[in-house]
Amino acid sequence: MKASRCALTGRDRARRFSHEVTRAFARSPRTVDERYVAVPGARLYCRSIGAGPPLLVLHGGPDFNHHYLLPELDRLSGAFRLHYYDQRGRGKSAAGVVPTDVSIETEVEDLDNMRRYLGREAISLLGHSWGCLLAMEYATRHPDRVDRLILLNTAPGSHVDAARFRKHRQATDAATLHTMQSIAATTDYAAGDLATDAAYYRAHFDATLPPADCESVVARLRAHFTPADIVKARAIEARLYAQTWDLHAYDLLPKLRRVAAPTLVLHGDRDFIPTECAANIAQALPHATMIVLQRCGHFAYLERPAAVVRAIVDHASAGPGRL
């Protein structure tokens, strides 16, 4: 790992980070702090809570916002100062943005601007699903600016693994895919109708979540979206797919070998993204630990909250010596 611009080495930063986690874990969560962070071409909504070293949270989708992660992920606020932000053009960061304003490059630049806003030479990242792909994109481009990676229910890291995921889904859940395709073909879905969008995602996540948990997630997905916002977010999603998974040459795995940050890869044994996809990422990272949670699907923070919190806190508290 290259030395950062500050005097501390990556190992020194990781050791300091683990000490801060140990001290902060017993503290009570603080009041939620909400603000907008100005970046070139957009204003990013940011929600912060907790005490301890900063942990920047990257939501999935990529057509969602941070809200579906709450309140369960806030359990980490006893050990970390959590900073969630809505990615450009989605949720509370939608105003003034059109889909063509968003690319994988602007996503990485926005993340780097959040790091600067938080005043860190290097930042620890927690991604969920697509948010893991964004975290990996950032880490491969700026390895000296990442203290630690936590990849929760990670999305595939290559075109090949994205195709593996889709093939696996077709083989194991063709009926659900047919239902989703039928819903997506309706005029109500195309218009961003909230109830129709909810029906689509209820079908999408049914195979990976118990019914009660599925309803809970679906109810959160569009809490900060209008129908027009949904249509815009879908267009952004299509652009990001076209610039990543849809490219036959897209492959982050070889680039991950130069990322020296300690990494935790947490996956569910019932996740609809095959465990092999997560394992390929863990194997590519030089200092990764992978944990497969049993009886767990794609939303580990919701399905196994205590296990997720303990794994993340243990990983951070162990410091660089564990890895």
Image (cartoon, rainbow, N blue to C red):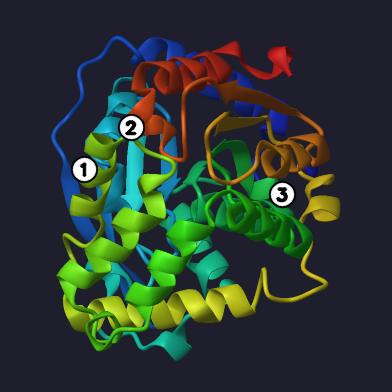
Q: Determine which residue is flagged by label 3.
A: 143
Res. 216 mark: 1
**Disc 2 residue crowd, few under 14, some 14–19, many 20+, Cα 10 Å:** many
Asked if residue 89 shows in the view, the reply is no
Mark 1: which secondary structure?
Answer: helix
Quadrant assignment for the C terminus? top right
Mark 3: which secondary structure?
Answer: helix
Mark 2: which secondary structure?
Answer: helix
For this rendering, which residue is in front, 33 or 87? 87
Residue in the image at 44% along x and 55% along y: 60
For this rendering, which residue is in front, 67 or 138? 67
Asked if residue 62 shows in the view, the reply is yes
* Amino acid type at mark 1: Ser
Q: Determine which residue is flagged by label 2.
A: 302
- Using residue 204 as the reference point, say whether residue 78 is left or right of it: left
- Using residue 67 as the reference point, say whether residue 2 is left or right of it: right
Q: Quadrant of residue 304?
A: top left
| Residue ranking furthest to the front | 175
List x then y, in percent, for residue 286.
Answer: 82, 34
**Distance of label 3 from label 2 (alpha carbons):** 30 Å
List x then y, in percent, for residue 14.
Answer: 62, 25
* Amino acid type at mark 2: Leu
For this rendering, which residue is in front, 189 or 123? 189
* Amino acid type at mark 3: Pro
Residue in the image at 30% along x and 55% along y: 202
| Residue ranking furthest to the left | 31
